[in-house]
Each structure stands twice: as structure tokens, then as C-alpha cells.
Amino acid sequence: MSQQGRRLAVYKKILQDNVKKWMIKEFLEYKLSRLGYVDSEILKTPLGTRIVIYAERPSRIIGKKGAVVKELSQILGSKLGVENPQIDVIDISKVDVPEMFPKVVAYRIANAMAKGIRFRRVAFVAIRQVTEAGARGFELVISGKLSTERAKFEKYKIGKVYKTGYDSMKTMRHAVVHVLLKPGIYGIKVSIAPVNARFADDFKLRPPTRPEAQSQ
């Protein structure tokens, strides 16, 4: 095989691995969205594929005697072709404050709206919880048939929220969740600037140093 052919084979393998990771993440979010699922990490090991699930409620994802985890392992192995899946479930509170994760906040809002609580009340509760947790910035956009038959959106923002550049793509945390209610589908978009994150415009002024006295 030529050098160019080997390179194409490597690129194809990388693309296939990334597609499989995306499929696994999409499946987990679809299957566990109502059980406190937040995010997942997929790692290749000599023994197979290790999947770390970060959850707000780990016990619900594990299930009684590990029933849910066993079902997930079986589906991932048979349907998605994951080699020897090993699933670990970690409490998100051991990693960071739950309110620093946009998906946690968005699912809380969606569940509250599904119970019939007005969106403005839910939005103000979310703002209070996130700001009390110490977030540097928070933006919430709720769209749908909020008060009339015509769809619109309402935006709530507090603190510093980065919209463009490296900080917007890498440092800010974003999540979009949809909830189906009687009037239709509502969209909930959450953006959070974490409390411990370092942004490009962070700087400290050093006090001027006095020059050492010249020797006599």
C-alpha cells in the first residue's frame, strides 16, 4: 500500500471511531435523559471500551442490582458494536458543583415546565441557583409558545457571557434541551461561565517594585 493510501486508511479509522463515539453519546443521552444523565466519556483500553457516565442521580442509572447498566452494556455490544463495554457511573457532584453544568440546569427547567410550573418562575429559580453557586456568567433562552399561539423566545442573562472566540467555544459550557408539552415543543438553551475557569481577559496587575538602593 502506498504512503497516501495508508494515510487515507488512518483518517478513515479516526472518522469511524469519532462517529461511533458520537453514536454512543447520543444513545446514552436518549436512553438516560430522564434519569439524571449529564455527560459521558469514552476511553479505549486494552480490555475493551470504558464508558464513564457522569450523572446527577447515579443510583437511578445503575438501577436495582445494576439492571440498567447491564441492559446498556448488552445494547451497546449487540446494537452498536462496542467491544467489551465497561460502564462506570460517577456522581457529578464529586467532579464539580452540579449548577456549573448547563445540562443539569436545562433538565431541571424542562422537568419543572413539564409539571406545569410557569417558565418565568422556573427561570428565576435557575438564575438564583446558578448565581449562588458562584457562576461568573449565565444565559438562559427559552423558546416556544410561551404566552400566545405564536412562538417566541425570552432571554435571561446575568454576569459575563462570552459569545465569540476561543472562550465561547472551549471555556464556556453550553447545553440545549427540548421538552414536549401540550402547546408544542419548547427549547431550553443554557450557557454558563464556570466559577473556576480561566478566560482570555483575566489578568492581574502586579504592584510596582522598588529598585534596590544603589550601594554607596
Image (tube, grey):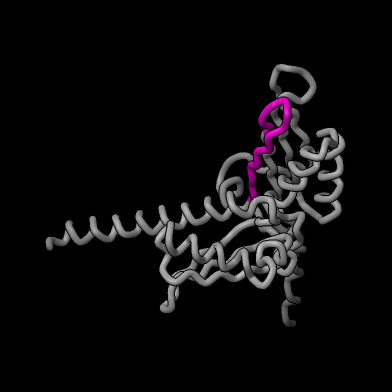
Give the total number of marks visible in the rendering. Answer: 0
Quarter of the image for the C terminus: give it: bottom right
Q: Dividing the picture into quarters, in which one does residue 164 lie?
A: top right
Which residue, as the protein is rendered here, is positioned at the far left?
1
Residue 159 included in the magenta stretch of the image: no
**Residue 95 in sight from this viewpoint:** no
Instruction: List x then y, in percent, for residue 176.
Output: 63, 42
Q: Is residue 110 above or below residue 5?
A: above
Q: Name the residue rendered at 64%, 63% in the picture.
A: 54
Principal SS element in the magenta part? strand
Q: In terms of depth relative to the viewer, which is nearer, 141 or 184?
A: 184
Q: In terms of depth relative to the viewer, which is nearer, 59 or 177?
A: 59
Instruction: List x then y, in percent, for residue 127.
Output: 82, 44
Q: Dividing the picture into quarters, in which one does residue 125 lie?
A: top right
Residue 174 included in the magenta stretch of the image: yes
Residue 28 lies left or right of residue 80; in this view the side is right
Quarter of the image for the N terminus: give it: bottom left
**Residue 130 in sight from this viewpoint:** yes
Q: Name the residue rendered at 41%, 53% in the picture.
A: 19
Q: Name the residue rendered at 60%, 45% in the picture.
A: 168
Instruction: List x then y, in percent, for residue 179.
Output: 68, 37
Q: Name the residue rendered at 64%, 49% in the picture.
A: 172
Instruction: List x then y, in percent, for residue 198.
Output: 66, 58
In the image, the segment drawn in magenta is 172-186
